[in-house]
Amino acid sequence: MLSFRELAVTDIAECQGIWAELGSHYDHPIGGSWNNEKLADEIRDHQGVGIFSGEGQLEAFCLYRLLPPDRREIMLLVTRPRAHRTGAMRALMRSFIDELRPDESVWLEVHAGNVPAISLYESFGFQLCGERPDYYADGGKALLYEYKPLQ
Ligand SMILES: CC(C)(COP(=O)(O)OP(=O)(O)OC[C@H]1O[C@@H](n2cnc3c(N)ncnc32)[C@H](O)[C@@H]1OP(=O)(O)O)[C@@H](O)C(=O)NCCC(=O)NCCS
């Protein structure tokens, strides 16, 4: 049985562990300059939600920021590699979106080469609303997406 809850500082080490595992298991560019320190700062200073297995193990997490009065920005989504393509992030995103107020929108940027992430966002109805050429360190383009509950 999976459960959801907001992340706490006590989850930082497990998020870092999943991030470390991901390095050798993901063939697509993720974008951004994430590392252990940035992950810890983001969890301490902003918001995050996780999906946990029945045994209490973190399977996937979403880091996001509240941008008052009516926006959220998704900063990072990660699923533990052994749980990839099992529906963990779809369940987490469903829960995240179901909690939005009708007037709230969600923004995010994603590396144009990150095919799995783009497919996920578009399947939820995120709309492409901009591009930033040469945005990432590898020269990759950033795609900007927005989700509005009432669109
Ligand atoms: C992107 C990511 C979070 C998806 O998580 P996941 O738990 O494996 O995703 P799910 O199993 O819930 O799949 C949801 C949808 O994502 C898309 N998707 C996931 N993996 C995919 C793949 N390998 N190829 C194409 N689409 C994929 C599909 O639309 C999928 O729906 P479907 O299975 O019904 O076709 C995961 O691949 C990951 O951790 N990637 C590394 C970090 C990252 O790139 N984060 C996003 C940028 S911040």
Image: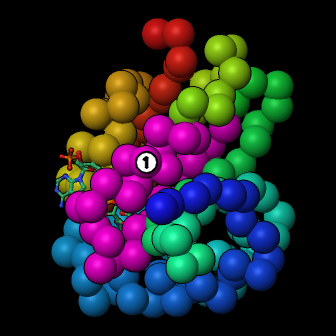
> Is 84 on the left or on the right of 8, as rendered?
left
Query: Looking at the image, how many numbered discs can be counted on the residues?
Result: 1
- Ligand 1's quadrant: bottom left
Q: Is residue 138 above or below residue 25?
A: above
Q: Residue at x 69, y 81 (%)?
A: 12
Residue 61 visible: no
**Mark 1 packing: few (<14 Cα in 10 Å), some, or many (20+)?**
some
Q: Is residue 139 above or below residue 147?
A: below
Say which amino acid is labelled 1. Answer: Ala
Foreground of the two, 21 or 58? 58
> What scheme was used to colour the molecule?
rainbow
> Is 5 on the left or on the right of 128, as rendered?
right
Foreground of the two, 83 or 122? 83
**Is-magenta flag for residue 73?**
yes
Q: Is residue 3 above or below residue 101?
A: below
> Is 142 on the left or on the right of 35, as rendered?
left
Name the residue at the top extreme: 151
Span of residues in magenta: 72-96
Q: Residue at x 57, y 48 (%)?
A: 74
Q: Residue at x 29, y 79 (%)?
A: 82
Residue 92: horizontal and vertical position, in percent?
Answer: 49, 50
Residue 135: horizontal and vertical position, in percent?
Answer: 41, 55
Q: Residue at x 35, y 86 (%)?
A: 23
Question: Is the residue marked 1 within 8 Å of ligand 1, measured from its CB?
Answer: yes
Q: Secondary structure at mark 1?
A: helix
> Is 20 on the left or on the right of 11, as rendered?
left
Residue 74 visible: yes
In which image quadrant can residue 34 be found?
A: bottom right
**Is-magenta flag for residue 55?**
no
The residue wearing badge 1 is 91
Residue 116: horizontal and vertical position, in percent?
Answer: 24, 54
In which image quadrant can residue 66 be found?
A: top right
